Image (cartoon, rainbow, N blue to C red):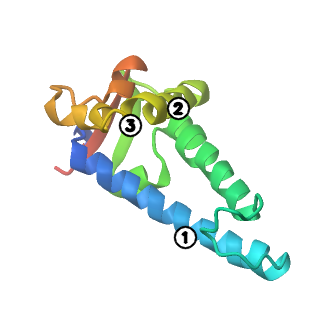
């Protein structure tokens, strides 16, 4: 059996993986909302109602984020969406990045790479090693499995 081969993941690979993660999150949060908040607790507001109280769906979404994007990526290199697409986040030293580094990478991505016209995320398009700003700061690569 041939050994797996990996190459730097491009912008579209990463975008598709993030889209998959987002779809999974929304589906699971809707289920939590309709089963717990709406059916069991009787909340009458809609899922996107800004004036509703903190809900089970909100708590579930944050727990999912911490587990999927931080714990799983930190320990295995793959969120569910990255696993579907065949991507892996690794340290530049070639190994898992760990929980705290993954959490910092996610927070940095949200606070620095995103707000300035998403330039930190788009940087992947021009960078030779396909790194976004948060990858450079936290010394990570996103790799794509190559079919051979």
The Cα atoms of the two marked residues, 2 and 1, are separated by: 23 Å
Q: How many labels does the image show?
A: 3
As drawn, which residue projects farthest toward the right? Answer: 41
Secondary structure under tag 1 reads helix
Instruction: Choose the circle earlier in sequence order: 2 or 1.
Output: 1
Front position among marks 2 and 3: 3
Residue 115 picture location, percent across and down: 39, 35
Left or right of 101 in this view: 140: left
Whether pointer 3 and pointer 1 mark residues with C-beta atoms closer than 8 Å, the reply is no
Q: Label 3, secondary structure: give it.
A: loop
Residue at mark 1? 27
The quadrant in which residue 114 appears is: top left
On screen, residue 119 versus residue 43, left or right, reads left
Q: Nearer the N terminus, badge 3 or badge 1?
A: 1
Which residue is the site of mark 3?
114
Where 131 sits versus 83, above or below? Answer: above
């Amino acid at each position: 059996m041939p050994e797996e081969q990996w190459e730097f993941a491009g912008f579209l690979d990463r975008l598709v993986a993030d889209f998959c993660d987002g779809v999974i999150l929304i589906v699971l949060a809707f289920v939590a909302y309709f089963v717990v908040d709406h059916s069991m607790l009787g909340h009458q507001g809609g899922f996107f109602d800004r004036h509703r109280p903190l809900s089970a769906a909100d708590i579930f979404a944050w727990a999912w984020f911490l587990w999927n994007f931080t714990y799983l990526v930190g320990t295995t290199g793959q969120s569910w969406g990255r696993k579907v697409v065949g991507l892996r986040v690794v340290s530049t030293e070639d190994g898992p990045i760990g929980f705290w580094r993954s959490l910092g990478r996610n927070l940095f991505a949200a606070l620095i790479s995103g707000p300035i016209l998403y330039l930190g995320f788009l940087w992947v398009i021009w960078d030779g090693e396909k790194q976004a700003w948060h990858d450079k700061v936290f010394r990570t690569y996103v790799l794509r499995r190559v079919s051979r």
